[in-house]
Image: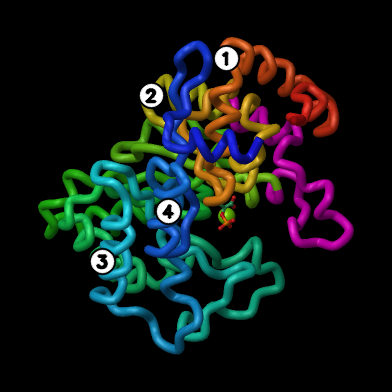
Amino acid sequence: RRERELAAKDQPAVTTDGHAVQVVANIGGADDAAQSVTMGGEGVGLLRSEFVFLGRTTAPTEAEQADVYAACAKALRPGDPLVIRTLDVGGDKPLAYVPIPVEENPFLGIRGVRVGLEQPELLRTQLRAILAAAEAGAELHIMFPMIATIADWRAAKAIYDEVAEDHPTSAHVSVGIMMEVPSVAVMAEQFAAEDGCDFFSVGTNDLTSYTLAMDRGHPKLASQVDPCNPAVLKLIGDAAEALHRHGKWLGICGGVASDVQAVPILLGLGVDELSCSIPAIPAVKAAVRAVSIAHCREIAARAVTCATPEDVRALVPATED
Ligand code: PEP
Ligand code: MG
């Protein structure tokens, strides 16, 4: 089966009844971007920009960052999207030169965009670097991690607007947020109505953890942290409906986007883009081509009424060959 998937890796991901889904990659840098293209990736749905910041003793400068972002864009095919997530540290990802106080509950503390709001110069420098890279002509999208409230979004967007004023290329850059805190999914309608909030991408890893109040790395609990939990699927499906009413798109960049068993359910819930690990791209594209959107919608409608993740997974038999 792997051979067949690889042979078709460059064909678009379109269901048997003509519904197209964008299959893109999660990457950490330019080498990954180049590799994603060779695996049939149609762009990048998540550049985890923290990789530019990790393993150093000082923060990367604006020029250093711009070089990395431009190199990622250049490694893609012209016109393919590149979604750059702003620095997502704190919680499980500490940084020596970004003073984040030791907290009793780091996963409920200063992490993700909250770090950038506490230290706006860090965020400003990064946004300037991304906009400088946009001058290379790439289709750039900026995404803020760990947004929880409308106030978070407005504060981050205000910093972006300030920086964008000086950059003519910003007209071609779209701005969106990660949906990885349940409040954003529940309030998708209000977030979608916000000016300049162009798109959303579900971080199912954190969304599942925060929905179930279980650490995905916990030795005893990790096996229950399943993004196919009906609670998580219902959040995604309801959010997709609300966003589409406002003409906004919804991607998935958490690990479940690489799970071929979940692909029909995610399509049926209304997801527009799947951002997966590079090796998973050919199989995810094949999984899209194997189903009809009509069938996916039926399965998704049943999935959100299931009692357990096991019941959900039983709706989609694992593929054999
Ligand atoms: C997620 O939470 O699903 C996600 C994509 O972000 P990260 O795994 O980098 O926290
Ligand atoms: Mg996350």
Is any atom of residue 127 visible in this view?
no
Residues packed near mark 3 inside 10 Å, few (<14), some (14 to 19) or many (20 plus): many
- Badge 1 is on which residue? 292
Residue 36 picture location, percent across and down: 44, 51
Labels 3 and 4: the sequence-earlier one: 3
The kind of secondary structure element at disc 3 is helix
- Which region shows up in magenta? 209-237
The kind of secondary structure element at disc 1 is loop
Which of the image's four quarters has the C terminus?
Answer: top right
- Badge 3 is on which residue? 129
Labels 3 and 1: the sequence-earlier one: 3
Say which amino acid is labelled 2.
His
- Badge 4 is on which residue? 144
Labels 3 and 2: the sequence-earlier one: 3
- Of the residues tagged 1 and 4, which is closer to the observer? 1
Query: What distance separates the C-alpha of mark 1 from that of mark 4?
Result: 33 Å
The kind of secondary structure element at disc 4 is strand
Say which mark, if any, is on residue 246: 2
Residue 106: quarter of image:
bottom right
| 98 relative position to 247: left or right | right
Say which amino acid is labelled 3.
Ala
